[in-house]
Image: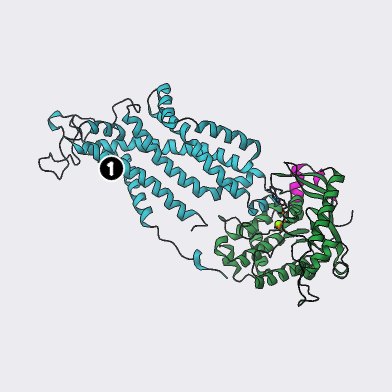
Chain colours: A cyan, B green
């Protein structure tokens, strides 16, 4: 009568381990940057310019991943850049998620005029080309951490709204929702206690994906010099600088690029892994 | 007003104007089982949903009365109506797959009704839920309470839904084809279970099905619905002995009855179908729909 699916504790899986591990490492790196960074990320030393990473002959000890053309330590700069990347990922991702998912949930569950207004708004919003929109916004708001976050939220909330709306709509048509209402639940209560838990796995997957996207957007904006105006190191900024000297010092470009790539990949894999694990139907 | 549930001239339309239920009237007497038969798409589920106030958004009640325990539900303000329905009626749904919340354990889904409706304490409700699960013959109820719906078979889920429908001792239960999604052997057990529970709890039951064989086993009275219109309302014996409406007669001929299980099956003849459709059309003309 009862099969054994519920009995098996699924192992966490390589995907969750690897992505979770990398992100944990990043968080630790960001928090502990002042203590673990081998050098001051802003300290220039023109005599030590373009030093290769540690395994290449002729390096100065202590500069593990080499130095850039101004003699700044690449590893330390990546570590400090992590702080900014993670702040943007966390704050922008969470805000985008809160706004988009709330609107999507309301539209998908209540339908009727709230849905018409929200959906129309989403349609119009999505007609703007996103990158142009971002650059325009930053140009208006002026560069800076807050502007980047606002730009990401303003552009990406529609992704959450659309997906969550569709999901809430299909859940809302199910009999268990009707039963909850027959049992005297209010519509709002039903939305929070019946619909939301079933949409949550999707929201979590979207959220982590969004964090990855936020990291990329921040990098792109730094790349085109629209990000933080101070000289605090950012991954995008490092990539932009590294690009100019890629033939003389490839490491200045490659290490931040790898870090960026692994981070974005980890965010999306973490999301998928969590969804698989916490979706009661897939589990 | 006759009947614990008494539906009078209920008309339900799509917001686009199409009529789904045409001036439907039916009665479920106190402590009795009333069958509602009709082919797929006739509007059986919509009657149940109209009573429970869970019609899909595209549909609305445009006329009629629904009397439940002496009160016209449609005349009540929205919140009062919801409370009244919650305290008086419950549903055994058609599809046990979508009728339980997939992200919640079984226990809370049963106890919730007791806590919400009867304001019981959590531990009282849990004890009662265990007892109910035993009553619907679920082995190892304590473990089932901790399970998620997807961990259980269809028959188990339907038993749980029955337990959960009877939990708060509603005076009326609407069972919407409670056995259609199950295989034949399980169907019989579930049917017997519902009938037993109904007798034991003295509940009034509106039993929706498209299976006259099932009706003949559990119901006291029945209504035959065709294309959103009640074409016959009768006591069981009279209906099976002497069906009046041609569609009812044809339906009976198309059903392997308990009186003559070996008898050959006759499909509903075209002539009867077109006659009923003509009748429905005339009705629409008369009521201007
Ligand atoms: N959400 C909806 N929007 C539009 N039409 C609907 C909707 N739900 C049901 N209908 C229509 O209402 C009519 C009655 O449907 P209902 O579900 O009551 O049939 P039923 O008699 O319960 O059939 P079944 O035996 O298949 O369950 C059908 O013709 C169907 O097309
Ligand atoms: Mg139905």
For residue A49, which quarter of the picture?
top left
On whether residue B182 falls in the magenta region, the answer is no
Q: Is label 1 within 8 A of ligand 1 (CB to nearest ligand atom)?
A: no
From what the image shows, is residue B158 above or below residue A186?
below
Say if A171 sits above or below A34 in the image. Answer: below
In the rendering, at what x and y percent does residue B17 appear?
75, 42
Query: Is B78 within the magenta?
Result: yes
- Please name the residue shown 63% across and 40% down the image: A111
Identify the residue under disc 1: A258
Residue B170 relative to residue A213: left or right: right
Residue furthest front in the image: B271
Task: For residue B221, say whether it is visible.
Answer: no
Residue at x 76% of width, y 74% of height: B264
How crowded is the residue under tag 1: few (<14 C-alpha within 10 Å), some, or many (20+)?
Answer: few
- Report the side of A17 relative to B149 (left or right): left
Q: Mark 1 lies on which chain?
A: A
- Relative image position of residue B277 (x, y in whole percent): 81, 54
**Residue B283 on image: x %, y %:** 85, 49
Q: Between A22 and B129, which is closer to the camera in this rendering? A: A22
Q: Can residue A9 be seen in this view?
A: yes
Left or right: where does residue B138 sit relative to residue A205? right
- Between A283 and B217, the residue placed more toward the observer is B217
The range drawn in magenta is B68-85
Between B106 and A248, the residue placed more toward the observer is: A248
Residue A146 falls in image quadrant: top left
Label 1: element kind: helix
């Amino acid at each position: 009568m009862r099969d054994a699916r519920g009995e098996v504790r699924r192992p966490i899986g390589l995907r969750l381990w690897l992505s979770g591990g990398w992100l944990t490492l990043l968080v630790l790196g960001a928090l502990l940057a002042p203590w673990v960074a081998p050098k001051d990320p802003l300290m220039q030393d023109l005599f030590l310019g373009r030093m290769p990473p540690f395994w290449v002959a002729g390096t100065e000890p202590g500069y593990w991943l080499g130095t850039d053309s101004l003699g700044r330590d690449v590893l330390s700069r990546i570590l400090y850049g992590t702080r900014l990347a993670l702040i943007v990922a966390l704050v922008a991702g969470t805000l985008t998620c809160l706004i988009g998912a709330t609107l999507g949930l309301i539209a998908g569950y209540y339908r009727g005029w709230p849905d018409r207004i929200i959906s129309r708004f989403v349609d119009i919003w999505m007609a703007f080309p996103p990158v142009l929109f971002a650059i325009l916004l930053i140009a208006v708001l002026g560069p800076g951490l807050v502007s980047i976050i606002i730009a990401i939220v303003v552009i990406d909330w529609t992704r959450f709204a659309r997906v969550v709306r569709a999901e809430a709509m299909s859940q809302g048509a199910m009999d268990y929702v009707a039963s909850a209402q027959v049992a005297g639940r209010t519509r709002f209560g039903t939305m929070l206690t019946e619909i939301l838990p079933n949409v949550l796995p999707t929201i979590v997957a979207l959220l982590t994906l969004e964090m990855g996207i936020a990291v990329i957007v921040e990098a792109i904006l730094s790349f085109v010099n629209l990000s933080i105006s101070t000289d605090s190191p950012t991954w995008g900024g490092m990539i932009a600088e590294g690009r100019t000297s890629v033939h003389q010092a490839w490491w200045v470009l490659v290490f931040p690029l790898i870090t960026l790539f692994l981070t974005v990949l980890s965010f999306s894999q973490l999301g998928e892994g969590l969804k698989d694990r916490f979706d009661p139907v897939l589990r | 007003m006759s009947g614990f549930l008494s539906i009078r001239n209920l008309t339900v339309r799509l917001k686009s104007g199409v009529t789904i239920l045409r001036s439907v009237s039916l009665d479920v007497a106190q402590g009795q089982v009333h069958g509602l038969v009709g082919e797929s798409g006739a509007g059986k589920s919509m009657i149940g949903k109209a009573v429970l106030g869970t019609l899909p958004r595209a549909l609305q009640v445009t006329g009629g009365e629904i009397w439940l325990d002496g009160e016209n539900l449609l005349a009540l303000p929205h919140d009062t109506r919801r409370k009244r329905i919650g305290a008086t009626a419950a549903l055994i749904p058609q599809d046990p797959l979508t009728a339980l919340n997939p992200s919640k354990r079984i226990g809370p889904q049963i106890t919730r009704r007791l806590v919400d409706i009867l304001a019981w304490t959590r531990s009282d409700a849990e004890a009662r839920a265990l007892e109910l699960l035993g009553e619907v013959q679920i082995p190892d109820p304590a473990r089932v309470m901790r399970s998620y719906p997807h961990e259980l078979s269809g028959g188990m889920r339907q038993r749980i839904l029955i337990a959960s429908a009877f939990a708060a001792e509603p005076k009326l239960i609407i069972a919407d084809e409670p056995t259609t999604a199950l295989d034949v052997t399980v169907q019989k057990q579930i049917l017997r279970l519902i009938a037993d529970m109904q007798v034991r709890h003295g509940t009034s039951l509106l039993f929706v099905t498209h299976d006259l064989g099932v009706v003949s086993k559990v119901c006291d009275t029945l209504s035959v619905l065709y294309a959103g219109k009640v074409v016959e309302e009768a006591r069981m014996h009279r209906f099976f002995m002497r069906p009046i409406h041609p569609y009812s007669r044809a339906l009976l001929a198309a059903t392997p009855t308990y009186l003559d299980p070996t008898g050959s099956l006759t499909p509903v003849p075209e002539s009867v179908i077109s006659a009923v459709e003509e009748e429905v059309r005339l009705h629409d003309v008369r009521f201007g729909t």
